[in-house]
Amino acid sequence: MSTWSAPVRYAECDQQGVVFNAHYLAYADEAMTAVLDEAGTPYAQLYERGFDTSVVASELSWSSSARYGDVVDVDGAIDAVGRTSFVVAFVIAVGGRVCCRVRTTYVLTAGDAAPTPVPDDLRTAWGFPGAGRATAAPAP
């Protein structure tokens, strides 16, 4: 079962009839909230605790193309957790054929958009226990 799926829309394709490269980042971004949901840490819950996320880096590598009418399946998992950041690895596929791999680094931020340590309970839920501190974002 994939984390997130959607049909490729005509507007997402370039003149060569394949999904334009920037749309793979949008697919990964859509799947990110599903990854957090599956980890038991829904994005809305993080937001209620005073946290938000910012993308600081993404790396993409392509092995084939998705085309109009295909259904893209995006599987994702939290792959690493740093002091204030975490990495989500995504695999974007069509019918089991891998099209693109994406690694995106997110920084956990507080209300003032400043990086904040990843709390222990999130680390544990994401499979990377230890090294955190805060359980809620610092008050603004």
Image: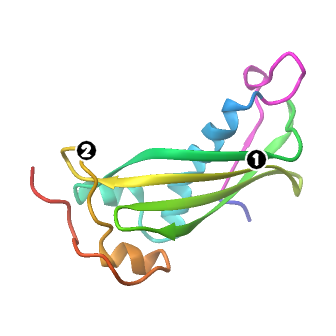
Q: Which residues are magenta?
A: 4-19
The residue located at (24%, 48%) in the rendering is 114
The amino acid at mark 1 is Ser
Q: Is residue 138 left or right of residue 131?
A: left
Badge 1 local density, few (<14 within 10 Å), some, or many (20+)?
Answer: few
Badge 2 local density, few (<14 within 10 Å), some, or many (20+)?
Answer: some
The residue located at (34%, 62%) in the rendering is 84
Q: Position of residue 82 (x, y in %)?
A: 42, 67
The amino acid at mark 2 is Ala
> Which of the image's four quarters has the N terminus?
bottom right
Q: Which mark is residue 113?
A: 2
Local secondary structure at mark 2:
loop
The residue located at (81%, 51%) in the rendering is 93
Q: In this rendering, is residue 52 above or below 11? A: below
Q: Which residue is mark 1?
A: 61
Q: In this rendering, is residue 111 above or below 10? A: below
Q: Position of residue 140 (x, y in %)?
A: 9, 49
